[in-house]
């Protein structure tokens, strides 16, 4: 996860841009899908190569001005759609994309707009919607049961003090509705052990959990990967930058268990005696991380991990049992308040 800041003037830094461009090989040309447009960092760089065509998606209406500027500058090469990346197959036909890129987590535009409630340095409304969401963090903390809040914070935030935080949220809202970010921050800080020495802010994991739940980020990621592999050409590249352990676990699972060199068949895969049935070519399990220079320039990048895989030429049908692997996340996100 990107650690939150209060600055409204921080520049947008696309994470591991040089590594992404090297893997994507835009000098060869082709159709590139930027599933998380954000500040447009990847798209802008890709469009500098004259043979590229970029189709970008983002659920956030606040970046429309940036996308419109690029559409004017590259009228026949850049196309934007305000959609979730789980809907990428609605704007790109099957086996038509050369590269699909995901940069997960929050953009600096979202972080630095304190009115949106992503930053625990804000005193504004507790929202946390990235766009096209059906609920808000305010609705979650005021309407969910104690058990539900505990599950959200523990499972999606991996917060060991989830029970105490959930209990204190309930106590507080019985006296006064929780509507502002600083109210929630105060509750969390009172709930955490006083001797915490972790470098991250004590509110980080709870905020991560609420943000993931509000935006159904785990569901989106799983469906997004599935749809992305459907629109990729044989030999096409899927590249994903993740920021927390749940995201990376999902990405690694897909790339490892559906590759031609998996060590043993996954119990979630359909039984098939044909060993050539695989979604990806040989996966090297190589992880790219930001350089020390980049981390100094852009501290939020320090938790980023980049993985990529290459689509095989095989026809592949995802097993229905796949969702069992991530059942606890999917069921939790499907039970919105």
Image (cartoon, grey):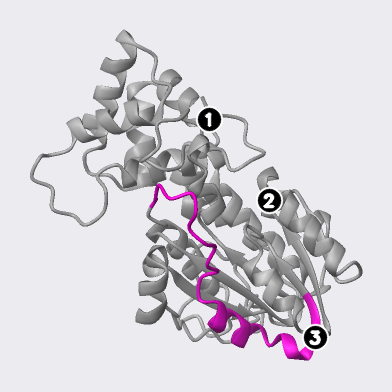
Earlier sequence position, callout 3 versus callout 2: 3
> For numbered disc 3, what is the local secondary structure?
loop
> Which of the two marks, 2 or 1, is nearer to us in this view?
2
Question: In the image shown, does 127 or 23 lie closer to the viewer?
Answer: 127
Q: Which residue lies furthest to the top in this view?
A: 175
Can you give x and y, in whole percent of width and height, for residue 10 in the image?
A: 48, 58
Residue 159 shown left or right of residue 114 in the figure: left
Q: Mark 1 points at which residue?
A: 136
Q: Is residue 180 magenta?
A: no
Q: Label 1 to label 3, Cα distance in Å? A: 40 Å
Q: Label 2 to label 1, Cα distance in Å? A: 20 Å
Sort mark 2 into few (<14), some (14-19) or many (20+) by Cα contacts within 10 Å. Answer: some
Q: Name the residue under label 3.
A: 29
Q: Name the residue under label 2.
A: 63
Q: Quadrant location of the N terminus?
A: bottom left
Q: Label 3 to label 2, Cα distance in Å? A: 26 Å
Can you give x and y, in whole percent of width and height, for residue 315 in the image?
A: 76, 74
- Is residue 69 depicted above or below 254 in this figure? above
What residue range appears in magenta? 4-31
Question: In the image shown, does 285 or 106 lie closer to the viewer?
Answer: 106
Image quadrant of residue 202? top left
> Which of the two marks, 3 or 2, is nearer to us in this view?
2
Sort mark 3 into few (<14), some (14-19) or many (20+) by Cα contacts within 10 Å. Answer: some
Question: In the image shown, does 52 or 223 lie closer to the viewer?
Answer: 52
Residue 153 in view of the camera:
yes
Residue at the location (57% across, 55% down)?
221
- Is residue 2 depicted above or below 274 in this figure? above
- Is residue 90 depicted above or below 44 in this figure? above
Question: In the image shown, does 312 or 149 lie closer to the viewer?
Answer: 149
Residue 89 shown left or right of residue 321 in the figure: right
Residue at the location (52% across, 37% down)?
116
> For numbered disc 1, what is the local secondary structure?
loop
């Amino acid at each position: 996860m990107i650690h939150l800041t209060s600055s409204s003037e921080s520049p947008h830094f696309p994470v591991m841009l040089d590594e992404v461009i090297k893997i994507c090989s835009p000098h060869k040309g082709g159709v590139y899908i930027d599933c998380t447009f954000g500040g447009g960092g990847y798209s802008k760089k890709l469009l500098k190569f004259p043979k590229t065509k970029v189709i970008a998606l983002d659920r956030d209406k606040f970046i429309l001005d940036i996308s419109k500027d690029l559409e004017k500058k590259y009228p026949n090469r850049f196309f934007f759609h305000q959609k979730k990346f789980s809907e990428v197959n609605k704007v790109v036909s099957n086996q038509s994309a050369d590269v699909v890129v995901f940069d997960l987590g929050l953009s600096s535009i979202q972080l630095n707009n304190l009115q949106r409630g992503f930053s625990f340095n804000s005193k504004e409304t507790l929202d946390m919607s990235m766009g096209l969401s059906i609920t808000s963090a305010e609705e979650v903390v005021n309407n969910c049961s104690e058990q539900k809040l505990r599950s959200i914070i523990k499972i999606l935030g991996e917060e060991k003090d989830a029970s105490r935080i959930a209990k204190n949220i309930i106590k507080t809202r019985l006296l006064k509705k929780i509507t502002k970010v600083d109210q929630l921050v105060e509750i969390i800080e009172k709930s955490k052990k006083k001797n915490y020495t972790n470098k991250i802010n004590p509110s980080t994991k709870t905020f991560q959990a609420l943000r993931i739940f509000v935006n159904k980020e785990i569901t989106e990621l799983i469906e997004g990967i599935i749809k992305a592999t459907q629109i990729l050409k044989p030999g096409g590249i899927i590249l994903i930058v993740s920021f927390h352990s749940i995201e990376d676990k999902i990405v690694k699972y897909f790339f490892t268990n559906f590759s031609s060199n998996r060590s043993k068949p996954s119990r979630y895969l359909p039984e098939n005696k044909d060993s050539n049935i695989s979604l990806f070519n040989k996966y090297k399990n190589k992880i790219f991380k930001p350089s020390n220079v980049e981390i100094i320039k852009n501290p939020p990048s320090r938790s980023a991990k980049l993985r990529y895989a290459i689509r095989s030429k095989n026809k592949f049908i995802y097993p229905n049992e796949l969702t069992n692997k991530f059942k606890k996340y999917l069921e939790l996100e499907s039970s919105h308040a």
